[in-house]
Image: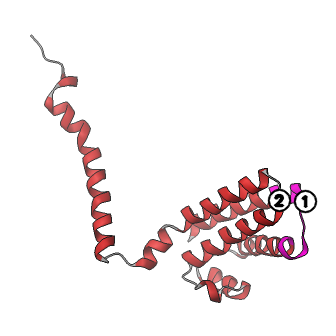
Amino acid sequence: LQKSFAGSPVFWSLWGSPLALLLGFLGFRRWQARRGEVDPEVLRRQRARKAAQLHLQNAHHHLEQNQARAFFDEVSRASLGYVSDKLHIEPSRLSKPLIRERLIASGIKPPLIERFLQILQTCEMALFAGQDDPARMRSTYEEAEGVISELEGKL
């Protein structure tokens, strides 16, 4: 009589140990955060991409609804929030020259910096000059997604 490995206690312990380790790690990180052992700036930096993605999801919703003002506002929030969190710039100090300076200091290539700043320029023009061209909205959305993804790989 030969026992199957698939139902044995060894099988179940080997199968469940990665899950237990993952849950243990997540619990430990939560415990550290509650005790204040994790630097809030580090957490902000780690969560920058996720926050930008949420704003871009909202922007996509506004794009589908053809709500230009809300769309460009969300793209602007995603972009500015991302660099603010990644480069440790206080939101009140955000400016294009400071963003350019910090991105250069972080080793980002000038063409990518210019693409990022162009997104900000497009959003400003749309918000303050009332542009609502659907094709421009879609291209801005795609460009913002692409630039933030590229920056994520380099920051």
Q: Is residue 54 left or right of residue 140?
A: left
Marks 2 and 1 sit apart, C-alpha to C-alpha, by 6 Å
Circle 1: residue type: Asp
For the point 76% across and 74% down, the residue is 120
Query: Residue 99, position in %: x, y?
Result: 67, 83
- CB under 8 Å between callouts 2 and 1? yes
Q: Is residue 135 visible?
A: yes
For the point 62% across and 67% down, the residue is 151
Q: Is residue 80 left or right of residue 140?
A: left
Query: Residue 13, position in %: x, y?
Result: 18, 37
* Above or below for 112 versus 41: above
Query: Residue 142, position in %: x, y?
Result: 75, 56
What number is the disc on residue 133?
1
* Above or below for 84 versus 126: below
Query: Residue 144, position in %: x, y?
Result: 72, 63
Res 153 quadrant in image:
bottom right
**Image color mode:** secondary structure
Which residues make up the magenta segment? 126-139
Residue, disc 2: 137
Res 70 quadrant in image:
bottom right
